Image (cartoon, rainbow, N blue to C red):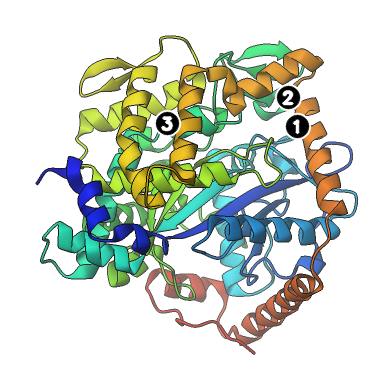
């Protein structure tokens, strides 16, 4: 089948109308920062509700790392509106703290000063905190407070029906969708370096982040480290990675959904000598959930993941095996300090086009050599993406980034026109603006940040602080519709009630609960009252 013609065939089949029901959701992390520029040591604000049970306002690794979660909606503008309203509500309850406007953190006073997220006294809450303690013991707490934006995407059901018919594929629809999305994920990995090039916004970092460790980062000023052509240090060698891969050979397999689930299951069930030295329960305190290659699935770092909505305490691998892939999570987005929300409409429109393009392209399995090239390309672009003449590895040959990027964007035109229902629409326009960044790297957020730092004589901290304060003032001055305010206040109250019900329902000690969880013997529904 000639896949080059697929956008035209789908257009004739009426897919443009079906694609309008695609769904987008966002997860946006932000550090709470004290007035002195250091990580906030205060608890998650009580007025925001329970981080364990609130559907839209929670925390990630640290008590100071707020995570805002939007619903999955068909209109990207509505997604951003919800995220904006959530920011306004949160800022009402931060006192003199502010949300840090970049991915790389504020002044860090060592890992011991970073508080783990706390979720209450229930077994489920304890498990979440122990998991985070394990992450800190395995990789260090400093790396865990890097923030990011996750782009969650699913195609409309009507589109899947049309697409399967055009592919003349007779497989069971759920299987077809899952395997097609695994192919899409493989392609997103192949060309994923384009995301940090276009949207990377972490070219520099406060030197407190490296904590005196050996690094070849250059010194921008007495307190700032950087690479001159970096796009996203968050995705580079100093960012979040599963360092144990080098010692255990752990790498998720994306050949099929079944292969992916089996590779993660192996990692969760296989002891790792390196982590056995940490211990699991030391005295009366758990230092990690187990001493296996991965404690749980979420520990595995990847720029893109297949996801299924989980029931209460359901393992993600079980959810994928039982119900297939519900959506794809792209995790390679930096928090953009030039966007008050950390992400903007133009970016969402481009990413939707990228998802469709990646789906429609042929996607062979990723062999070992190509896997190494994918990983090396990501680090190269993270560290040196704007370097003139930079070459990446493709099909065992070196190709100039600029040439490859133009080829990708040329290929994306058909997908953009399919989403817009014609040659003049927001997806096509976003594609045009991204093309300008390829020819003019100074237009990228990473280049703009470094240029602004030079022009104003600022280091990374001063730049990030100034923009954090600018966004804080804007959110503080913004009005929230009374109905929206009441909505968030109701969710906060309901989340506390649910947390209390979960705590009251516990009938076993944590040791038993943890054994039951890994054995698959936990209840599938959380107590509601």
Q: Which residue does the image show at 29% across and 40% down from the upper left?
A: 187
| Residue 157 placement: quadrant | bottom left
Q: How many marks?
A: 3
- Residue 214 lies, with reference to residue 23, above or below; the image says above
Residue that badge 1 annotates: 464
CB under 8 Å between discs 1 and 2: yes
- Residue 263 lies, with reference to residue 143, above or below; the image says below
Whichever of callouts 3 and 1 sits on the residue coming sooner in the sequence is 3
- Residue 241 lies, with reference to residue 473, above or below; the image says above
- Residue 363 lies, with reference to residue 51, above or below; the image says above
Distance between the alpha carbons at the discs numbered 2 and 3: 24 Å
Location of residue 211 in the rendering, given as x and y in whole percent from the top left corner: 68, 26
- Does 221 sit left or right of 201 as displayed? right
Which one is nearer the viewer's eye here, 72 or 371?
72
- Does 159 sit left or right of 447 as displayed? left
Location of residue 48 in the rendering, given as x and y in whole percent from the top left corner: 76, 66
Residue that badge 3 annotates: 194
Residue that badge 2 annotates: 460
Q: Which residue does the image show at 12% across and 43% down from the upper left?
A: 2
């Amino acid at each position: 089948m000639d896949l080059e013609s697929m956008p035209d065939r789908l257009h004739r089949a009426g897919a443009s109308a079906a694609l309008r029901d695609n769904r987008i959701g966002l997860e946006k992390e932000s550090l709470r920062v004290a007035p002195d520029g250091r990580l906030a040591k205060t608890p998650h604000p009580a007025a925001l509700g329970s981080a364990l049970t609130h559907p839209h306002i929670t925390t990630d690794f640290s008590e100071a790392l707020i995570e805002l979660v939007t619903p999955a909606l068909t209109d990207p503008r509505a997604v951003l509106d919800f995220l904006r309203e959530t920011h306004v509500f949160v800022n009402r309850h931060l006192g003199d703290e502010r949300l840090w406007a970049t991915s790389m953190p504020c002044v860090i006073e060592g890992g011991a000063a970073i508080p783990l997220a706390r979720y209450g006294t229930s077994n489920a809450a304890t498990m979440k905190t122990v998991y985070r303690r394990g992450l800190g013991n395995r990789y260090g707490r400093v790396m865990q407070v890097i923030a990011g934006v996750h782009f969650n995407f699913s195609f409309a059901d009507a589109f899947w029906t049309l697409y399967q018919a055009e592919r003349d594929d007779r497989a069971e629809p759920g299987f077809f969708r899952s395997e097609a999305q695994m192919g899409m994920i493989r392609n997103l990995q192949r060309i994923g370096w384009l995301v940090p090039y276009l949207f990377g916004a972490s070219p520099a970092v406060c030197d407190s982040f490296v904590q005196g460790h050996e690094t070849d980062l250059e010194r921008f000023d007495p307190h700032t480290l950087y690479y001159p052509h970096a796009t996203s240090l968050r995705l580079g060698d100093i960012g979040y990675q599963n360092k144990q891969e080098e010692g255990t050979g752990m790498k998720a397999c994306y050949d099929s959904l079944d292969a992916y689930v089996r590779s993660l299951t192996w990692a969760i069930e296989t002891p790792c000598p390196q982590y056995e030295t940490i211990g699991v329960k030391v005295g009366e305190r758990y230092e990690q959930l187990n001493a296996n290659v991965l404690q749980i699935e979420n520990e595995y770092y990847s720029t893109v993941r297949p996801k299924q909505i989980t029931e209460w305490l359901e393992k993600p691998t079980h959810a994928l095996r039982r119900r297939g892939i519900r959506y794809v999570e792209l995790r390679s987005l930096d928090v953009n300090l030039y966007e008050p929300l950390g992400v903007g409409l133009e970016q969402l429109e481009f990413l939707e086009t990228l998802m469709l393009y990646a789906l429609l392209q042929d996607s062979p399995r990723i062999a070992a050599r190509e896997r190494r090239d994918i990983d090396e390309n990501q680090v190269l672009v993270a560290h040196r993406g704007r370097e003139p003449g930079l070459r990446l590895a493709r099909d065992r040959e070196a190709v100039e980034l600029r040439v490859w990027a133009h080829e990708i964007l040329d290929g994306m035109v058909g997908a953009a026109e399919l989403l817009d229902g014609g040659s003049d629409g927001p997806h096509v326009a976003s594609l045009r603006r991204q093309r300008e960044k390829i020819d003019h790297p100074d237009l990228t957020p990473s280049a703009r940040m470094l240029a602004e730092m030079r022009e104003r004589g600022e280091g990374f901290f001063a730049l990030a602080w100034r923009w954090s304060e600018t966004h804080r003032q804007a959110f503080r001055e913004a009005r929230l519709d009374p109905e929206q305010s009441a909505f968030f206040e109701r969710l906060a109250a309901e989340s506390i009630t649910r947390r209390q019900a979960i705590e009251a329902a516990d009938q076993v000690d944590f040791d038993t609960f943890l054994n039951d969880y890994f054995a698959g013997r936990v209840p599938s529904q959380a107590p509601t009252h």
